[in-house]
Image: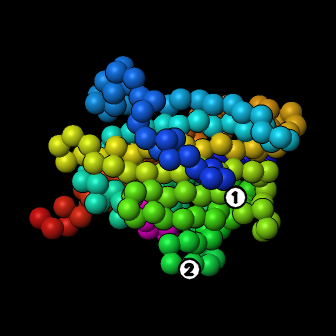
Amino acid sequence: MLSVVVVSFATPSRSLSSNDQLTTEDKKLLAAGELVMKHKNEQRGAYKLIGGQSWQIMDVPVDVAWQALSNLTGYKNFIPLVTESDIKHRAGEEADLAIRQEWGPIDVRYVLQTTLEADRRSMVFRVDHSQAHDIRAGWGFMRVRPYKGNQTLVSFGALVDIGDGVFVSIIRPAVRKDLLRIPFYFKRHVEAEVAALRTDNL
């Protein structure tokens, strides 16, 4: 079972979405355009969780980044290996987002319970256990904040249990790597959209 994507923090800690954990060296890497990742493994009850946190600077204003983050229908453009995404239910700032990911013979489906927090420009999510899910558990957040100049700092954190077995143990490092690269994929998608709009307006 492969769930190379987003997951959800059951009750995402507000401190997790800050940049307090960024060192001086991390900030230098961010300023140079690098993706900064911090891996984490955690045993929580029966769950064997992998994931961590990652940060990326985007060359777009924070309002543009937030517009993209709050557009759930666009998540298929930056979640790795997604072939289908559909909003099953929406009520205010809460929504159920059905996800399907495919990689060769692997076909993974699950539903994310998402909540948009406009005051913090963040989105928190968790795997909905009340609906069919091909991964054991997952929770996390994604947040955008103004950075120097007209840039945006995007932060992401997630933990996920993708199951057991020999095959799962083989793909687990690749899953975590792609999971924590979501800020990079988000940056690439949003900046490409902005560039396309600018070209169309010339």
Quote the CA–CA distance across marks 1 and 2.
17 Å
Q: Is residue 117 shown above or below 19?
A: below
Q: Position of residue 195 (x, y in %)?
A: 24, 56
In the image, 185 versus 163, the foreground residue is: 163
Secondary structure, mark 1, is strand
Residue at image location 34% in from the left, 21% down from the top: 24
**Badge 1 is on which residue?**
127
In which image quadrant can residue 89 be found? bottom right
Residue 156's x, y, as percent?
Answer: 49, 44
Q: Which residue, given by chain and number where applicable, does mark 2 sit on?
A: 91
Q: Alpha-carbon neighbours of circle 1 within 10 Å: few (<14), some, or many (≥20)?
A: many
User: Is residue 71 highlighted in magenta?
Assistant: yes
Characterize the magenta stretch by its predominant secondary structure: helix
- Dot 2: within a 10 Å radius of its alpha carbon, few (fewer than 14), some, or many (20 or more) residues? few
Amino acid found under the numbered disc labelled 2: Ala
Q: Percent position (x, y) of residue 103?
A: 68, 50
Start-end of magenta stretch = 68-73
Occupied quadrant, residue 202:
bottom left
- Name which residue type carries label 1: Val
Report how many numbered discs are placed on residues in the image. Answer: 2
Q: Say whether disc 1 or disc 2 marks the residue closer to the N-terminus.
A: 2
